[in-house]
Amino acid sequence: MSSKQSIRNVLGLAHALRGTRAPAGFFGTPELPSRSFRSMGTVATVTFGAAYADRIEPVASHIRKVFDRLEREMSAYRPDSAISQLSQKAGVAPVAVTKDTYRVLNLAQHFGRLSNGTFDNTASPLVSLWGFNGAPIPAVLPSDQAIQEALKLVDYRRVVLRDGTAILPVKGMAVDVGGIAKGYAVDLAYEYCLSSGIRDFLVDFSGNVRAAGRPSWSEGWQIGVRDPFDRSRVIGKITLPSGLAVATSGSYERFVDIAGEHFSHIIDPRTGYPVSGTASVTVLCADATMADALSTSFFVAGLKGAAELLKKNSLVELLLVPDRYPMDLWLTPGLDKAFTTQRTERRHMLTCL
Ligand code: AMP
Ligand code: MG
């Protein structure tokens, strides 16, 4: 199977292997109280330990409201969101943004620096050029000139944040926080569950997962990592230590076909082209915002750039699957310990340079 074929037949994200979502009897787990709802164009699920069953309704309903508010503020698809306003006013005037949007923009800039620019929330003109975020899918490949023009508008360092306002200094610049906002939402949900007195819970927002405590039958919540080449399977499971987060970025999540070629939704802000060479990246680290931003970053960095990025992010654990056949898995030592699999793919150790 060629790498192009291989990414064609897959769809899905890391998800929690538990209760109703796990294939029947997979890990022999009993059902737990859980609530799922749609937000930000995808599905979120909140699961509680059995002891908190009577609390799930009000807590999940509050979380849903928070996620929907974040979507209204930060969606690139809604012309009235603060993020869209910011893009519309690029080169013209600052825009007052809410506390959460301000924090997300700040964190995005922070992860831009930590990722050597592989995470760039101003990649939006490129994201649109390649037919994502509601832009028309081009019939032919974007020209080199169009890519170079769009690249001139991409630089996370140029977003100016001051006193609750944000401005993009050049007309045509645009922001897309799609690579970090779900993780941020999960962290808010995590804090809310804790402050509500829930000790055993898991929040999963389209593969951005954070959990506390454990289900009663296991020493930790177990997170299945999708096989990036076969959506119906998992390549293994991660036992998530309490309080930590996991996120997966996959080339199979969203893609476009242009002139018979397959392109992933994650764009390399250094070249202007969709990333090729990585099938999926799973990050395990301290919180969900970081996991979300860095899974996108390591996806861009790929196997070649991962060791260099790990130097700056030494507390991050990583599972990287290159887009090639036969599949092989690259893991940092910490993730290697937390990861169990029945599969026989070759496992390699990833360490920083
Ligand atoms: P994720 O699924 O978290 O990896 O985020 C992917 C989304 O982030 C894409 O659908 C785009 O909206 C946006 N994006 C694409 N490329 C980048 C990039 N290099 N840096 C930051 N965000 C990006
Ligand atoms: Mg991300």
Image (tube, rainbow, N blue to C red):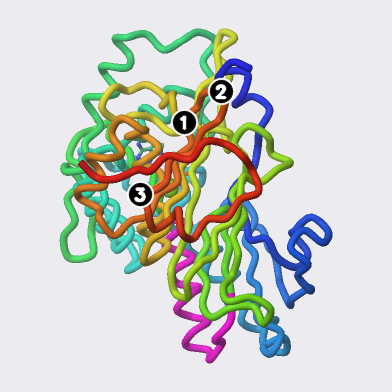
Q: Residues within 10 Å of mark 2 (few under 14, many from 20)?
A: few
Expressed as whole percent of the image width and height from the top left, the position of residue 133 reads 50, 35
Secondary structure state at the residue bearing disc 2: loop
In the rendered image of this protein, does residue 74 appear above or below residue 84? below
Q: Which mark is residue 325?
A: 2
In the rendered image of this protein, does residue 196 appear above or below residue 138? below
Q: Select label 3 or label 2 by which is in front.
A: 2
Quadrant location, the N terminus: top right
Disc 3 to disc 1, C-alpha distance: 16 Å
Disc 3 to disc 2, C-alpha distance: 25 Å
Residue 211 visible at all:
yes
Expressed as whole percent of the image width and height from the top left, the position of residue 320 reads 44, 40
* Mark before the other along the chain sequence, 3 or 1: 3
Q: Amino acid at mark 3?
A: Leu
Which quadrant of the frame does ligand 1 lie within?
Answer: top left
Quadrant in the rendering for residue 38: bottom right
In the rendered image of this protein, does residue 129 appear above or below residue 293? above
Secondary structure state at the residue bearing disc 3: helix
Q: Amino acid at mark 1?
A: Pro
- Of 11 and 148, the residue lying toward us: 11
Q: Amino acid at mark 2?
A: Tyr
Expressed as whole percent of the image width and height from the top left, the position of residue 156 reads 22, 42
Mark 3 close to ligand 2, CB under 8 Å: yes
Magenta residue check for 242: no
Q: Tell me which segment is drawn in magenta.
A: 181-201
